[in-house]
Image (tube, rainbow, N blue to C red):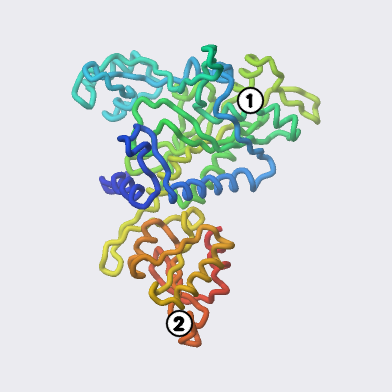
Amino acid sequence: MTNDYPKDMMEKLVSLCKRRGFIYQGSEIYGGLAGTYDYGPLGVALKKNIENLWWRYFVDSRDDMYGIDSAILMNPKVWEASGHVGGFNDPLVSDIKTKKRYRADHLLEEVGVNPRGMSLEQMGAAIQEKGIKSPDGNPLTTPQQFNMMFKTSVGSVDGSDTIVYMRPETAQGMFVNFKNIMDSYHPKLPFGIAQIGRNFRNEIAPRDFIFRVRELEIMEFEYFIEEKMWAEQFTYWQGQMMGWFKLLGFGEDDIKQIEISDGERAHYSKRTIDFHFKYAQKFDEIGGLAYRTDFDLKNHIEHSGIDLRYHDPVTNEKFVPHTLEPTFGVGRHLLAVLTKAYTEDDFGGEKRILLKLPPALAPIKAAVSPLLKNKPEIVAKARKVYEMLKKDIPQISWDDNGNVGKRYRRQDEIGTPFCIVIDFDTLGENPENKDTVTIRHRDTGEQERLPISELTNYIKSAIL
C-alpha cells in the first residue's frame, strides 16, 4: 500500500485545525512549548465524541467490562514493579555542537534502517555506517538510554519531599485496582477493566503535529483471562478492534496489522500486533493489542505483598490471571479521523474544503439558519426551530453570519452533516411548504424539504 495524500496534507490539516478552532499550539502567546497542544471548542467536541463512541462500543455495550478512572500520581513502587523505573527508556543522541537532542531510532528510520531490536551499540554503529548527522549537519554523540518518565514531588515544605512520577501509561491503574474490582463486584473470568486517561511521556523529539506529544490520552482496557484462553481471546479482540476502526469510517486499505516479532516486543509481551493507520506522513501506529501474560499482576504481588490471585468459584482454585491489552491513542485517533475526512472538491465551480466526518463523530450535528437575518419573522421562526432541536440534540449550532452560501462552506469545513434553513415558504407563503424547512446535505450538497415535526428524529437517526 502507498500513501496517496498530497505532500502538503499535514500542513493543510494543521492550518484547518488552527483556523476553525480544533487544535492550537500550547502556550502559543509565549512562543509555545514543543510537544504540547490545546484543543479548541471543535477539537474538544470531536475528541469527546471519539471517546464516548469508544466507551459505548467497548464498555457500555458489554456486561463483562468495568470502568475506572485511576489517579495520575501513584505510589512510586507501582513503577518499580511495572519495570518503568529501570526500563522505560528511549535511545538518545545529542548534537555535539548545539546540544540538541534526538531519538536515535527515528534518525535511523529516516534513512530506511529498521531499529527494532537493536542494542545501543548496534544503533551507534549503524549511525556511523550511514554517516548520519544532526539536522544541523553536526556530528552526534553515541546513543544513551533516556528515561521518559516525568518526575515531580509530593510532601511538606520542610524538604522531606517524596519523588513521584507522572504516569506514563494508564495500564497500571487497572492492575493495581484489580483487587478492588474483585472485592466490589466479584466478576467471573473473563472480564475487563477499562479507562480513558491522561499520560505523560518526556519525548526526546515530539513530531508530526499531535501524533507524538508529551501529554497524551489513552483509551484501553486490561482483559483478564485464564492462560489457556489467550490465543482464542487474542483473535477475538483482534476482530473487535478492526470492527472499531470500521465504525470510525476507516476502510480496509486504511489499516495495516503489524505482527511484532520476537526480540522486538515489549518485555512483558508474549504476542503483540500493532495497528497502523495511513496518516499523511506515513502508515504509523494508532493502536495495539498485546498479550501481557501474568507479568503485571505477578510483579505487583511480589512488590506489594498483596494476594492478587483470582479465586475460581467452581474449582476453588486460586491462580494469577493472564491479561490481554487492547490500547488506543486518543490524539492519534483524532488525527486519523481528520486525515480520513479531509476532502477538497470542485463544487459549483469553486474549490471546496470539507470534512466528511461520520455524523456520530461530527462536533456539530446540524446548523440552523434564517434565510435572511434582516427579516424578523424568519429569524424568530428559525430561533424556535433551533431551540426545539437543541433540547434533544445539544450539538446543534446557530449560524446567521454571511449569506447562505458562505454558511454552507463554513459548516462543510468543520464537518457539519446538515444545514437547516428557514425561509419564506416555512412561514406559509406557499401552503404546500408551510412549516417545512430546507435541509442541505454536506457531502453531496443536495437539498430537500422536511417538516419541522420530523427534524429531531431525522437527525437523531443519522447520528447514532
The amino acid sitting under disc 1 is Val
Q: Earlier in the sequence, mark 1 or mark 2?
A: 1
Residue at horizontal 54 percent and vertical 74 percent from the top: 452
Q: Position of residue 461 (x, y in %)?
A: 56, 63
Query: Of 296 and 174, which appears nearest the observer?
Result: 174
Query: Of 1 and 92, which appears nearest the observer?
Result: 92
Between the residue at mark 1 and the residue at mark 2, the CA separation in whole angstroms equals 63 Å
| Figure quadrant of residue 32 | top left
Instruction: Identify the residue at the far front of this view.
Output: 157
Residue under numbered circle 2: 425
Q: Quadrant of the C terminus?
A: bottom right
Q: Position of residue 315 (x, y in %)?
A: 80, 27
**Mark carried by residue 176:** 1
The amino acid sitting under disc 2 is Asp
| Figure quadrant of residue 131 | top left
Query: Of 317 and 21, which appears nearest the observer?
Result: 21
